[in-house]
Amino acid sequence: MRILTTIFFLVLTALLCSCDQQHSAPDIDPRLGLECFESRRASLPPGTQYEGIEKLAENRLTIKVMNGVAVETLACELNLDGTLQSTGK
């Protein structure tokens, strides 16, 4: 019985250690993600919620939003100075 319990806890520990932790987007101003969300809000379904920043690559900020059914990603273009580009609307 002790052997089975030991094996169970070893397997459980291995499974928990193998889980990938979420990585946050360091060195990105969180307000930039909110600005991106607000700039796209009019085109999103009612009740869509901002979930956070997914990544920043070159001049493109990708954020996560929950549309009530699934988490989706949206991209916003950035100016060279790191500010959000105007959507022209």
Image: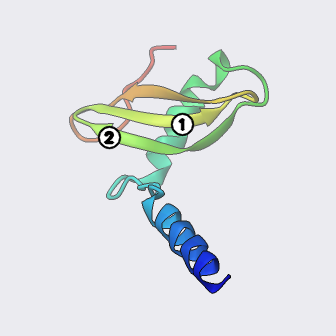
Q: Position of residue 17 (x, y in %)?
A: 45, 66
Q: Mark 1 — residue? A: 64
Any mark on residue 56, and which?
2
Q: Position of residue 52 (x, y in %)?
A: 54, 46
Looking at numbered disc 1 in the image, what kind of residue is underneath it?
Lys
Displayed quadrant of residue 7: bottom right
Q: Residues within 10 Å of mark 2 (few under 14, many from 20)?
A: some
CA–CA distance between discs 2 and 1? Answer: 12 Å
Q: Residues within 10 Å of mark 1 (few under 14, many from 20)?
A: some
Question: Which residue extends farthest bottom?
Answer: 2
Q: Is residue 8 above or below residue 57?
A: below
Q: Position of residue 3 (x, y in %)?
A: 58, 81
- Horizontal side of residue 66 vs 24, given as left or right: right
Q: Is residue 30 above or below residue 66?
A: below
Q: Nearer the viewer, residue 75 or 42?
A: 75
Q: Position of residue 14 (x, y in %)?
A: 47, 66
Q: Nearer the viewer, residue 6 or 55?
A: 6
